[in-house]
Amino acid sequence: MDESTRIRDASLGEIALVFLKLGTTAFGGPAAHLAMMEEEFVRRRRWITQAEFLDRLATANLFPGPSSTEVAIFVGQLKRGWRGLLVAGCCFIIPAALIVLAIAWAYVRFGSLPKVEGVLYAIKPAVVAIVIQALLKLGRSGVRTVLLAVIALLAVGLSLLGVSPVLVLVFAGLLSMASLATKNRLLGAAGLPKALGLPKVAVGSMAVAAVGAAFPVGIWRLFLSFLKIGSVMFGSGYVLLAFLRTEFVERLHWLTEKQLIDAVAVGQFTPGPLSATATFIGYVVAGWRGAIVATVGIFLPGFVLVALSGPFLPRLRRSAAVAAALDGVVAGSLALMAVVAWQLGRSSIVDRTTLVVFAASLVALLRLRLNSALVIAAAAVVGWVAR
């Protein structure tokens, strides 16, 4: 192997510096994050091969939680074991969490000021447009068969009827696996336990939720809520919105619709994973302690899953049952995204100005293919001027 293709080693210090840089500059959502990681680790630094990167990316897509963050954790694990896992994950997450924490403090302290309200007033319809863009993009690959389209439609109906997002995803995964088993005539007494492997994880997470519901509202309940969400949130980071709305707006009544959309907007126009929205919500609900436990709760499952999954990567990739379950869960996740887009649009597009911002944002994203961070920044300027 010549020098130009030799895989290079990386110290913990190098891993920390690179992921701190990515965590501070990685705007644009998971797709942009992954593109930056591929450029940084495969092409520029040659820390891993293209095949290793794609293998980790594919495996991350099998897990709940933010895929770009889990790929970062995988890279750290591959280079420096459990120490690299912790350093890479924390250094990618912490910059975004600190930025969001500062914004959350300003929001709580100055959020009632007209100029701040104006900025968020215009950002909200832009966020709806970004969710729609992600939905259209992911739908091409996520709902590619008639069966998956039917599953998605059923999931939309269940969500509109008020069924928990967790149960919607379990239903979608089970239905997809049952279809595969029926088609291949493999649904027998011996095959059923294996076929139910993936949803058992989700059911276990629901058990965590049930335990959490017995605790009084407070820091512990906040941690359990985000731990549950981080354990069952499949698909795009935007599926997070469905879980947040169900948990904190409808069930616990800790947030208003306005606060939820504001939290999503902050998560969108800051760098790093969208799941850093948890930091914002934690601070709004319970101050700096709430910000810490919310951030730890939502990202902890990703660290655990990556740490435990190494020996099982080849088996997961070859499992037809897991692949079928994932297809169903993705279709259900896209359905939840569609419902969330409708709900957020209803509360955000309230007059002519917000309608214009929404339409212009869609054109900028779908036709001009502008970066979502630029669209958010432009909307913020419009809101500042308009209000």
Image (cartoon, rainbow, N blue to C red):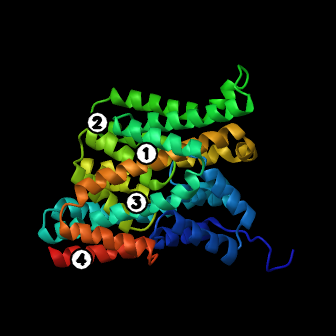
Q: Are marks 3 and 1 in contact (CB under 8 Å)?
A: no
Amino acid type indicated by mark 2: Arg
The residue indicated by pointer 2 is: 251
Q: Residue at x 33, y 58 (%)?
A: 264
What amino acid does circle 3 point to? Val
> Which numbered circle lies on residue 382?
4
Left or right of 4 in this view: 197: left
Marks 4,3: beta carbons within 8 A: no
> Disc 2 and disc 3: Cα gap in Å?
23 Å
Query: Residue under circle 3?
Result: 131
Image coordinates of residue 346 in percent, x first then y, are 25, 54
Q: Is residue 381 above or below residue 213?
A: below
**Relative horizontal placement of residue 162, taking residue 176 as reference (left or right):** left
The percent position of residue 47, horizontal first and vertical second, equals 70, 69
Q: Amino acid at mark 1?
A: Gly
What residue is pinned by disc 1? 297
Q: Specify which label sits upstream in the sequence, 1 or 2.
A: 2
The answer to which of marks 2 and 4 sits earlier in the sequence is 2
